[in-house]
Image (cartoon, grey):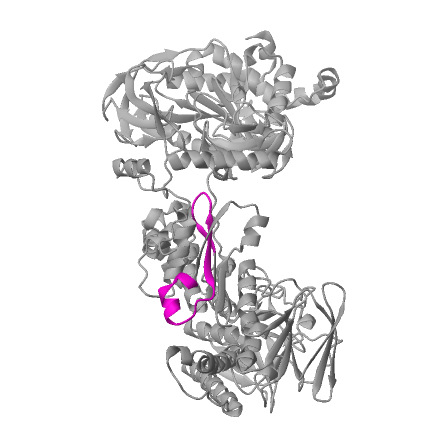
Amino acid sequence: MTYDLTVIGSGPGGYIAAIRAAQLGMKVALIEKYNTLGGTCLNVGCIPSKALLDSSELYHQAVHRFAEHGLEAEAPKINFGKMISRKGEVVKQTTDGIAFLMKKNKIDVYHGFGSFVDKNTIKIEGEESKIINSQKTIIATGSKPVMLPFIEFDKKRVITSTEALELKEIPKHLIVIGGGVIGLELGSVYARLGAEVTVVEYADALIPTMDVSMGKEIQRVLKKEGFKFNLKTKVDSVKVEGEEVVVKATDKKGKEVEIKGDYCLVSIGRRPYTDKLNCEAIGVKLDDRGRVEVDEHLQTSVDGIYAIGDVVKGAMLAHKAEEEGVFVAEHINGQKPHINYKLIPGVVYTWPEVASVGYTEQELKESKRAYKSGSFPFRASGRARASMDIDGLVKVLSDKETDEILGMHIIGPRAADMISEGVVAMEYRASAEDISRMSHAHPTYSEAIKEACLAATGDRALNM
Amino acid sequence: MSLQMTVPAVGESITEVTVAKWLVEDGDTVELDDVLCELESDKATFELVAEADGVITISPDAQEDAVLEIGALLCTIEEGEGAPKAAATSESAPAAAASEGPKATGEVLDMVVPTVGESISEVTIATWTKEDGDFVELDDLLCEIESDKATFELTAEAQGILRVIAQEGDTLEIGAPICKIEVMEGDAPAATSDAAPAAEASASAPTSSNSTYATGHASPAAAKILAEKGIDPATVKGTGVDGRITKEDAEKAQKTAAPKKEAKKSEAAAAPVAANPEDRVQRREKMTALRRTVSRRLVSVKNETAMLTTFNEVDMKPVMDLRKKYKEMFKDKHEIGLGFMSFFTKAVTVALQEWPAVNAYIDGNEIVYNDYADVSIAVSAPKGLVVPVIRNAESLSLAGIEKEVRRLALKARDNKLTIPEMEGGTFTITNGGVFGSMLSTPIINAPQSAILGMHNIVERPVAINGEVQIRPIMYVALSYDHRIIDGRESVSFLKRVKELLEDPIRLLLDV
């Protein structure tokens, strides 16, 4: 078979690129090594973790808040097996949805391991081997969790995010190595279900790529929920001893620390996954961090081969991969789309959620840009008090001279949904005053954004 | 101490410059007389040097390619030690002033019709760009003034409230009052500030749309459409809030360009192979100020003169023989090569003395004759054509002309020509021959009345005394303004140049 475009990897970047290319009239093939489509995000990432986060959040509410709401009942019993199987059902519905979309768009799906024979020939090794030809190819093979040599990774007690979504029991004490997005989200799941959670982080703050006030606030909130944090702590070894995991580390004072738990989640990052793709043999260059090198059109060093998502530079986010998928599909069809990488929001689905877009305060300080800052705490929001979600704040950073919004950082209820307002505003280069002069429905969480903008405009928040 | 550096006044007729290149970066420490940036006007490129030691802060409006008016802020130099600290305080000071808004000083500035040229005695107010009662900033464009020669702009000499005196269409004498400005102190009211003067200013200026940092910003969809159409967003007028470019604006911008494209498309449809769109990239660049001026002037010359061209041919053998014979000797003595340019220049100056109309120009109802020959030479410089002048070429020796040509050509190559070096020529010589041109009709270099075009030298069979001989021949062209040069004069002039070149001894004997 000969295709106009072949996409290797069916994650959110790959399947979206395939659909967009099909919409534009191309004959498209999609190769996926797993049995289900959707990649990490749908199978072992965003979607299943959100399913468990919501289940555990409901339980947490029932145990800790129902009484205050005037709902008196015995605390619900956890059927963890059911919780995991419901998550599986959500994943199945979602991945089935992708399979349907592929049919609808007349995209040929090949299940098997794709690798390059040459720039226009791809070998697929599955139940039977096939060779297909393609004018153009998109590498969308995503990423895998990083493991370190001194960690005894057995996938049973010492696990990655993938296994953490499929546990048979609720850990008694979960040790989380790495205080980034994945660690905090999955840590939250089990903390809410009653596990003791200890986070070990090498840096001096949580979610270090986000604005520093976000990391501080989330640390404060999670501490209240019972998280223990060991920041500036370097893990030296992780060993499994029977039913126990022993983590040995060196803390900020140089003292040795020993933490014992029954499970250890290693979430120290993800690496681009290009294994056995045969990239280098056909001339597709990788950079020193194993990422596929691409130009401004996301084309690799080989003409006609593109790469998107986690496998290239930039944030490892599903929505970033989606934008890149659409970008490449349109670009190879002669259109001239553009991605504003500065305006791809980052989100953490803890509760409160954390979401952020644009420049952080640290970045503005470093670039010596004159800026104003305005914040508004959810404590002062009527809507947030009604739902007892009073933790967190909205922080808006705007240019000192022009008032143009340069960054928006939210930690609070539904922050991940609300950040879109910041993205829209910033795509149109709105000023903080612009937002503060737009009507926001009352009572909503989003009023906090308006109030933060008022504060940034001239310290004139109205409800504080 | 902080020193503000502004665009210097660089010549009478120059009102704006383009920032070509910054040689220092924001925050760099510079020393007195360090070259900071290159500025480009429609006439020349010049360098801006630091007027003090210190740390430089480049004005956000003065980035590369920005077009700035004379007097506009280019950068600030923070003098002395501890500069960054001082910068911070000086920043906060004007901000504080801004919050208070501008204050009237009680001073009223009268603005009158400026002297715009020697022969101009009266002007007409063409259009007011500001209205009576508007708040104007220093150097804001107030109105356009027309004279019989050109249109120029009147800019505010102070900031304050504008009081218009002369109305559009009024004819005024030089020195007559145009408007008054009630001078105000303090920063201009910011668009976002809710201080009272801001409201007042915007209320009294309903026609002028707010220009902000976001003016001309294309929405994501608009940006994609413009990119695909190859339209520079800077050329699209945004109708969104504060001049943002909406999707509709981008679509409309596409429509104006559409008819041509459709025509092309139908041709392309007939082509057997559809070209890969990636191979057909269009590139758009802003015209430089120099290029804009050249284009404007060339068109105006074509429109405003009665230009035509006469041709002749020159047998170059005698000059070439002479050159061959004396090349070494000439070089040893004068330390410069003997080229054709000196012969042509010399021949032209002799002919100009004999046919003074070719060396004259029209000024209003008068003809101005020059009894000297300042010969402009067209030189292609990195940024485009420039035309430096050889002064009093009639009194220079051949060696003197060659030296002057070399000096000017070198300066042109390095963009170092000054405006005085390019002004005031009375006749121009252009040599398309260096690029291989056989024949062309050059355009007059206004306000001059004639231009001589040299071309390539080609061996051609010619009839000499009834015999065919192979001779190195150059076609020469003389474009001239028929309004003041008659056919007899132009043809005779060119024939005279031909004679002098075909028998260079005549230059010596003056016959």
The boundaries of the magenta stretch are: A379-407
> Residue A291: percent from the left, percent from the top?
64, 67
Q: How many marks?
A: 0
Nearer to the camera, A269 or A16: A269
Residue A399 counted in the magenta span: yes
**Residue at 49% of width from left, 37% of height from top?**
B92
Nearer to the camera, A214 or B56: A214
Q: Which quadrant would residue B101 be assigned to in this image?
A: top left
> Residue A24: percent from the left, percent from the top?
42, 71
**Residue at 48% of width from left, 10% of height from top?**
B353
The answer to whether residue A115 is above or below residue B183 is below
| One can see residue B268 in this view | no
Residue B417 counted in the magenta span: no
| Left-right relation of A346 to B268 | right
| Left-right relation of B471 to B135 | right
The answer to whether residue B446 is above or below residue A36 is above
Q: Which quadrant would residue B468 be assigned to in this image?
A: top right
The N terminus of chain B is located in which quarter? top right
The C terminus of chain B is located in which quarter? top right
> Residue A240: percent from the left, percent from the top?
73, 84
| One can see residue A126 in this view | yes
> Residue A173: percent from the left, percent from the top?
63, 81
Nearer to the camera, A121 or B305: A121
The answer to whether residue B335 is above or below residue B64 is above
Q: Which quadrant would residue A288 be assigned to in this image?
A: bottom right
The answer to whether residue B186 is above or below residue B355 is below
